[in-house]
Image (cartoon, helix red, strand yellow):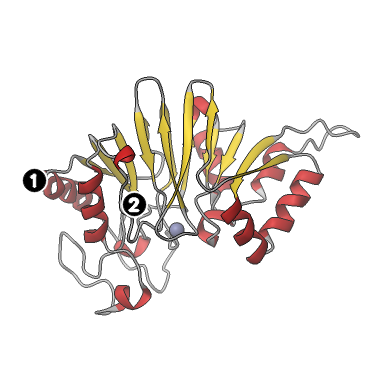
Amino acid sequence: MIVEFLGTAGGVPSLFDSVSQHKDAPIRTGPGLFIHDLKLLIDSSEDIFYQLRQAKIADIKYGIYSHWHPDHTMGLRIWETLNFDFVNTIPQSKVTTIYLTSQEVEDFKTYFGHWNHLLYLQQIGVVELKIVSNNAKITIKDTTIEWIQLSEKIAFGFYITTPTKRLLIIPDEIKGFQPINKVKDVDVAILPFGSNEVNPVTKERIHEEGMLSTLGEATFEECVEIAKNINAKHTYFTHIEATESLTQLQAKALERQLSEAGISSTIAYDSLKIKV
Ligand SMILES: [Zn+2]
């Protein structure tokens, strides 16, 4: 299975000279993952248009969402841009099947008009909406995708199994997650990086002291603890805010630190393609 990290930022993608981004680090765009074998997209940030062009992805059969937060959903219009046939009088548009859990439907109805937007996209024939339960399991070809509702009930992870491999993807909102046995010892885990108040390599202060706990944000240390508990053969960390300002060298240093702590890991970057 080929998984591509379309974007590896979270709510703070890289901008030019933003007030909260002050160091030279690789550009990170909004969160998004694509499973090539299934033509399945996980989340559509506002950067999805650029990301699909960059990755040369023209055909998406399935879309799923981790949760309603704007950094994961503000590129919803991609379904129209990608699929709508603006050539023929009677459009012969492509159709992407979008799965949403009942929790997500409630949230999409509450926030930003997402649900109405999706209904419009369905009406113009570019998506087909399928509502599934909060612990749904679907099978595409020989791959099973199971939704795992997180401790932060608005959000979901995905437990993906093929005849030979097991993969756990948690795009965000991992705070308080207690891994169930089923998702332990997977071949690959893709987990959020969390945030640091000080750079974990240089120890330079990033945020005002106490800010992350005030905001209830998951810290990098918490994410590492959860990764240890999941005990994947290899863990990829993503959802890395541009405020972290991690240079490539620092990311490598961090991977070495994690390796010494018993976690085989990669700090993901935009356009990283992995084979599971
Ligand atoms: Zn996020």
Residue type at mark 1?
A: Glu
> Which SS class for mark 1?
helix
Choose top left, top right, bottom left or bottom right for residue 83.
top right
Q: Residue at x 76, y 39 (%)?
A: 84
Outermost residue on the right side: it is 89
Q: Report the image quarter containing ligand 1.
A: bottom left
As displayed, is residue 111 above or below residue 78? below
Residue 198 image offset from top left, x and y in percent:
21, 69
Residue 76 image offset from top left, x and y in percent:
63, 51
Residue 133 image offset from top left, x and y in percent:
57, 46
Residue type at mark 2?
A: Pro
Q: Earlier in the sequence, mark 2 or mark 1?
A: 2
Crowding near the residue tagged with mark 2, few <14, some 14–19, many ≥20 C-alpha atoms within 10 Å: some
Between tags 2 and 1, which lies in front? 1
Choose top left, top right, bottom left or bottom right for residue 183.
top left
Q: Residue at x 76, y 44 (%)?
A: 122
Question: Marks 2 and 1, how far apart in space?
Answer: 25 Å
Q: Which residue is mark 2?
A: 26
